[in-house]
Structures are given as C-alpha cells and as structure tokens.
Amino acid sequence: MPEKKERTYRFCFGPWNLSEGQDPYGPPTRPPQSFDWKLEKLKEIGFDAMMFHDDDVVPDIDQKSDKELLEEAKEVKKKLSDAGVAAEMVAPRLWFSPRTIDGAFTNNDPKCRRYAIERCLRCIDIARTLGTDLIVLWLAREGTYIRESKDGRKAVERIADAIDKMLAYDKKIRVAIEPKPNEPMDQAYVPTIGHALALAHLTRDPKRVGCLIESAHAILAGLDPADEIDFACAFGKLWSIHLNDQNGLKFDQDKPFGSVNLRSAFNQVRALERNGYGRKGEYVAFDVHPYRTTKVEHWTLHLENSRKTFLRLLEKARTFDEETAKKLIADRNYAELDQMTLDHLLGD
Ligand code: XLS
Ligand code: MG
C-alpha cells in the first residue's frame, strides 16, 4: 500500500448531547447536571471542542441585560480556556420562546420576527466572546403545520433578510444552515442542503453562508447523507457536521453514529475523507443522545462509541481497495463491487 499522509480529526459535542432522557411520554430518567460537570466529562473522554446553543452559555438569555450576557459568556470562555477546549459554534435557540411559537424569521407577527433577529445578534455577541466565527441556524420552526398559514415565497425572503442582518452586524461571522425537513414542523421551508445553499445566494454575502449536515436530517428527507456531504463539499460549503443515525422515517432519533446503517456510515466517512474535511479546522460533531434507558454511569458511552465507530470506519475507508474498485467500475461489475464493499466491512 502506498504511504498516505493521514489527517487526524477533531471531535466535538454539545451540552444537550448529555441529555436526561425525557421524551413526549415521560420525564427525565437521569438527574440534570451542571455545565461544569459536562465540560469535565468532555475532557475526560478526550473530545476537543464543545458546540453551544446561545442559552447553554447564557441561561435565561431573554431575561439578561447585554452587560450580564457578556459577563456570563466571558465566564464560560474562561472555563473553556482553562480546560483547553475550543468553542466550535453557537446556535440561537429560536424554538423555545413564546415569541417563536409560530416561527422565528417567518413568524406572521412583525414583533416576533424582530425578536428573532435581535436574539441572533445577541447570539453573535456570545460567539465572538467564545472565540468562534461560526453561527449555526437550525431553522426549527420555519415552516408550517398547515400550508395556508404562511406565504412560502415571503418566508424564504424573510429568512434571507434575517441572515443579511446577521452578516451586516458582524463582518467576520459565517452562518451555517442546518436543514431538516420536518419535526417539529409538518413541513420545513429549508429541508435539504440544496435548499440551504440556494438560500445562501439570496443573501448579501453568499461566501459567508454555508451549511451543516446532520446525518439523521438527511435520512428524514429521504436522502443519502454521503451524497449530501459530497454536494456541500463541491461548493466548499461544509463547515460543520452532525454525525448520528436514524432508523427510517420517524421522529428524529439522534442514535449513535453507525448504529443503524454501518454501510451508510462508512460512505459518510469515506466522503469526508476524500473531500479533505477538517483541513480548514472543521470539527466532527456527534449530535447523538443517550438512550432513555441509559444509567448515569454509562452517560457518555453514546459519544465515545460514535467516535470509536468513526475511527474504525476511517480505517476501513483508508484501506478500501481503490485499485480493484476502479477496475470493477471500468468493467461495470457493480455486483462484485457491492460484495467487495461488504467483505471489506465484515473483515476477512
Ligand atoms: C436538532 C438539531 C439541533 C442543532 C443545533 O434537530 O440537530 O440539535 O444541531 O441547534
Ligand atoms: Mg444537529
């Protein structure tokens, strides 16, 4: 095998990925833990960075003055620096407030739309304080329960306009849109990476608007996450990734990476590898949740296991017999290519 210069990947998760087990049908099954405990766990299992919602950094953010917001963000920044942990991104939580019941940027009430934009600007202040230029927009409630309730064209223009206001507020930030086709909404306005990247071109500075792919979200849209990765990378726009897994078309499961479809996970890793993902400092984030049944003493296993699977699949991607694959492709012998892939994944 020719010697290859091998890259190492850097890993990341968010405080919400150490969740307590509540679902729509039942209460938490693990006691809530402090931010310090979560940071400690992140260090313990050797991850490199943490990703945030704005109110993970500044709890009850809407009740806090600008001065309080900056003070609290600085405290978190100090904790991160002391721990040698980077902040990967900050995402405004635009789906919790009474003012975003009917959407954030696409709300039919102008006062609510204004609130959503102001909240994003405060999120940018937090990101700046934490030392990251990446703002992630999961457009959770930008959609409808019934289509007649909003004007789709206006909705798209309003989202672009909100992003413009963010780009104008800070000339350095980049916005990564994280699309998802449904849940909590029946239909979302930005369901796929194609939509996200097209939307970037409606903004004042398309170069600063890219995307974040979450495996489960692509699967929910009926798409192959590996193809979404290649598509985004063809535009140089994959700025973050949330690897996880999803068993078919149901609620967003955020299962450990590779736990449903190992072959699809392999193809995602292969796509990241061939596109040089991470070379510009991008992190591999696992947006995974512990199963509700998880005991306190096993609380970080879903994260450690996702990374373990990723690294094992990376080895598989790097040892895939590309030469034989090329010959099989030239001979249009996809049956053998199929089996060769399975054999490789199964090990000899
Ligand atoms: C939810 C999203 C969320 C984002 C960050 O489905 O994945 O966790 O990653 O707002
Ligand atoms: Mg996500």
Image: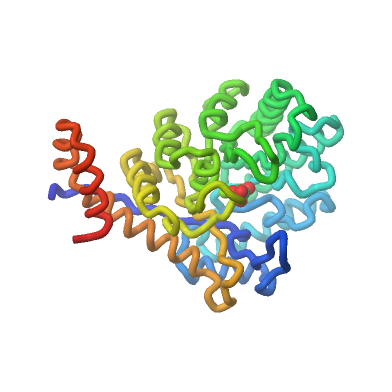
Q: Nearer the viewer, residue 237 or 312?
A: 312
Residue placed at 56% from the left, 37% from the top? 176
Give the residue at x 73% y 51%: 70
Q: Is residue 159 above or below residue 337?
A: above
| Number of numbered discs overlaid on the protein picture | 0
Q: Quadrant of residue 125?
A: top right
Point out residue 35 in the picture as x, y percentages from the top left corner: 65, 66
Q: Is residue 157 left or right of residue 243?
A: right
Residue located at (43% from left, 38% from top): 229
Q: Nearer the viewer, residue 193 or 47?
A: 193
Image quarter of residue 195: top right
Q: Nearer the viewer, residue 68 or 91?
A: 91
Quarter of the image containing the C terminus? bottom left
Q: Does residue 251 appear left or right of residue 123 in this picture?
A: left
Residue 44 seen from this side: yes
Work out which residue is located at the far front of the displayed protein and give it.
335
65 to the left or right of 201: right
